[in-house]
Image: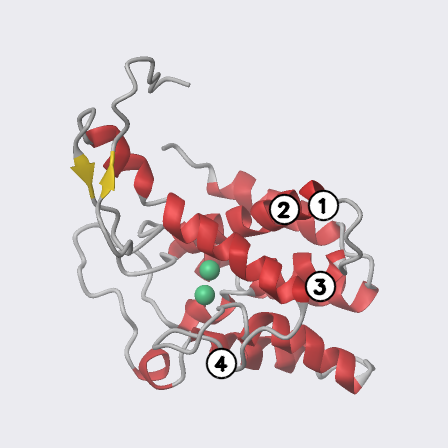
C-alpha cells in the first residue's frame, strides 16, 4: 500500500478542525505540531499491526475515521463528537515514547525505559495533561478528556487501560481502535492465502478460513 504520510497528517488536522471546543481543538493541533516528526516516523507496534514508518500516524488516522463512521451509523446517538475526535486523534500519542523511528530490518524497535515501565496509556495521559494544564478548563471535564486517552483499551492487560471505559465516547474509541488493529494486518494474510486455506493474523487468537464461495471476487 502506498501511503502519502503528509496527506494523512493533513487529514488528521482536518479532523481536528471539526472539534468545536476551542481548547481541545488548539491542544490537539499543538500536540500534532510538536509531535509531527515522531508520528510520521514511528510504527504503531513492533509487529502486530502498522509496523512501518509512519504506521503510528496512519493507525491514528484510521481509528479517527472509524470512530466518526461508527457514529454516523447511529445519527440519533447524542455522544460528544469533540471528545471522540480528540480522543481518537491522541489515543496512542504515548506510543511516541515507546518506539524508535522505524527502520527496515531493525527488529529492536522498542525504546526500553518508559514504555516498559509506564505503558502508552499512561504516557498519553501524561502528554495530554501537560498541554491541558496551560488552559483554564473545568477540572472534571479535564479528567474526562484524559480518560479518553488513558482508557482507550477495554481491558486491564499488559497494554491495557488505566481505568476501564466509563464513557460511551471512550467505548466507541475502543471499538474503532480494535477494528483497525485487527483488520489492517489481515490485508496481506488474506490475499496470500489460497481459497479454502486457513490463515493466521498476527494477534488473532485462532486461524481463519478463507471463503470457498465460487463467486468469491477478490477484486471487490
Ligand atoms: Fe493503544
Ligand atoms: Fe491504537
Q: CA distance from mark 3 to mark 1?
A: 16 Å
Image disc number at residue 155: none
Q: CA distance from mark 2 to mark 4?
A: 26 Å
The spot of residue 160 in percent (x, y) is 42, 74
Q: Quadrant of residue 111?
A: bottom left
Residue that appears at 82% across and 64% down: 22
Image disc number at residue 83: 3
**Which one is nearer the viewer's eye here, 149 or 175?**
175
Q: Quadrant of residue 212?
A: top left
Q: Secondary structure at mark 3?
A: helix
Frontmost of labels 2 and 4 is 2
State left or right for residue 139 relative to residue 71: right
Image disc number at residue 122: 4
Q: Earlier in the sequence, mark 4 or mark 1?
A: 1
Task: Confirm or deny contact between disc 3 and disc 1 (CB under 8 A).
Answer: no
Q: CA distance from mark 3 to mark 2?
A: 14 Å
Q: Residues within 10 Å of mark 3 (few under 14, many from 20)?
A: many
Residue that appears at 69% across and 53% down: 16
Instruction: Tell me the residue that label 2 is attached to.
Output: 70
Amino acid at each position: 500500500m502506498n501511503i502519502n504520510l503528509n496527506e494523512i497528517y493533513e487529514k488528521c488536522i482536518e479532523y481536528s478542525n471539526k472539534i468545536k471546543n476551542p481548547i481541545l481543538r488548539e491542544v490537539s493541533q499543538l500536540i500534532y505540531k510538536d509531535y509531527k516528526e515522531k508520528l510520521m516516523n514511528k510504527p504503531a507496534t513492533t509487529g502486530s499491526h502498522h509496523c512501518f514508518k509512519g504506521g503510528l500516524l496512519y493507525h491514528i488516522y484510521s481509528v479517527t475515521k472509524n470512530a466518526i463512521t461508527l457514529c454516523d451509523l447511529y445519527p440519533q446517538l447524542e455522544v460528544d463528537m469533540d471528545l471522540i475526535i480528540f480522543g481518537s486523534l491522541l489515543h496512542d500519542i504515548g506510543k511516541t515514547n515507546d518506539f524508535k523511528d522505524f527502520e527496515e530490518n531493525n527488529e529492536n524497535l522498542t525504546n526500553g525505559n518508559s514504555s516498559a515501565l509506564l505503558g502508552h496509556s499512561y504516557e498519553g495521559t501524561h502528554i495530554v495533561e501537560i498541554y491541558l494544564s496551560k488552559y483554564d478548563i473545568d477540572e472534571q471535564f479535564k479528567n474526562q478528556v484524559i480518560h479518553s486517552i488513558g482508557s482507550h483499551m477495554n481491558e486491564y492487560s499488559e497494554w491495557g487501560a488505566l481505568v476501564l471505559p466509563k464513557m460511551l465516547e471512550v467505548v466507541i474509541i475502543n471499538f474503532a481502535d480494535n477494528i483497525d488493529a485487527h483488520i489492517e494486518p489481515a490485508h496481506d494474510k488474506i490475499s496470500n492465502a489460497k481459497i479454502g486455506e486457513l490463515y493466521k493474523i498476527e494477534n488473532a487468537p485462532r486461524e481463519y478460513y478463507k471463503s470457498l464461495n465460487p463467486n468469491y471476487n477478490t477484486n471487490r
